[in-house]
Image (spheres, grey):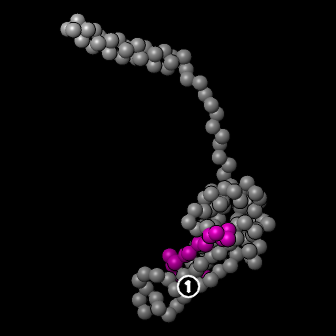
Amino acid sequence: MIEILSEIFLQDSEIQYSFIRAPGPGGQNVNKVETAVQLRFNIVHSPSIPSPIRQRLIALAGKQLTHQGDIIIKAYRYRTQNRNKQDALLRLQELFKQAAIVPKKRQKTKPTYSSTQRRLSHKKLHGKTKSLRGSKLKDIQ
């Protein structure tokens, strides 16, 4: 079992790892050794995730989410498979931590009395300047 959050644990069988060749520079080993890790985790069919967190995870995953509901995380920051595997797991945990935060609901507020008075006085002043412009045109005609 892998502890993602204090209340969420994932089975080892729910996470699949595949090892691929890392892109970019790496010397002679870049074409021989498969050090990069591709972590695959299905959000939709996982029984370990509560439904509100699942909904937020789907929204947060973005391009990492496939049509089948799999999150794919590629990790190739380090030169060893083990470090990249740990990095991919940490990134999955970070995604879960972000999804676990419940967004605050916005409370509607009324504008204050003084801000309403300021707005109305500015509006009257602006109207007065415009009316003064119009009166000059009437006198000419």
Name the residue at 43% across, 85% down. 26
Q: Quadrant of the C terminus?
A: top left
Q: Residue furthest left?
A: 140
Residue 102 colored in magenta in the image:
no
User: Visible in this render: residue 97?
Assistant: no
Q: Residue furthest front?
A: 141
Residue 78 colored in magenta in the image:
yes
Foreground pick, 73 / 65? 65
Q: Quadrant of the N terminus?
A: bottom right
The image quadrant that residue 60 belongs to is: bottom right
Estimate the x, y position of residue 24 in percent, counting from the top left.
43, 81
The residue labelled by disc 1 is 20
The image quadrant that residue 110 belongs to is: top right
Q: Viewed as shown, does residue 119 lie left or right of 38?
A: left
Q: Secondary structure at mark 1?
A: strand
Vertical position of residue 26 compared to residue 125: above or below: below
Estimate the x, y position of residue 116 in percent, counting from the top left.
51, 18
Vertical position of residue 51 compared to residue 127: above or below: below
Foreground pick, 132 / 7? 132
Name the residue at 77% across, 58% down. 50
Q: Viewed as shown, does residue 91 lie left or right of 100?
A: left
Vertical position of residue 41 compared to residue 106: above or below: below
Q: Residue furthest right?
A: 47
Foreground pick, 70 / 133? 133
The magenta region covers 66-83
Name the residue at 67% across, 71% down. 68
Count of marks, rendered view: 1
Estimate the x, y position of residue 96 in percent, counting from the top left.
66, 61
Estimate the x, y position of residue 54 in percent, counting from the top left.
71, 59
The three-letter code of the residue at mark 1 reads Ile
Foreground pick, 56 / 67? 67
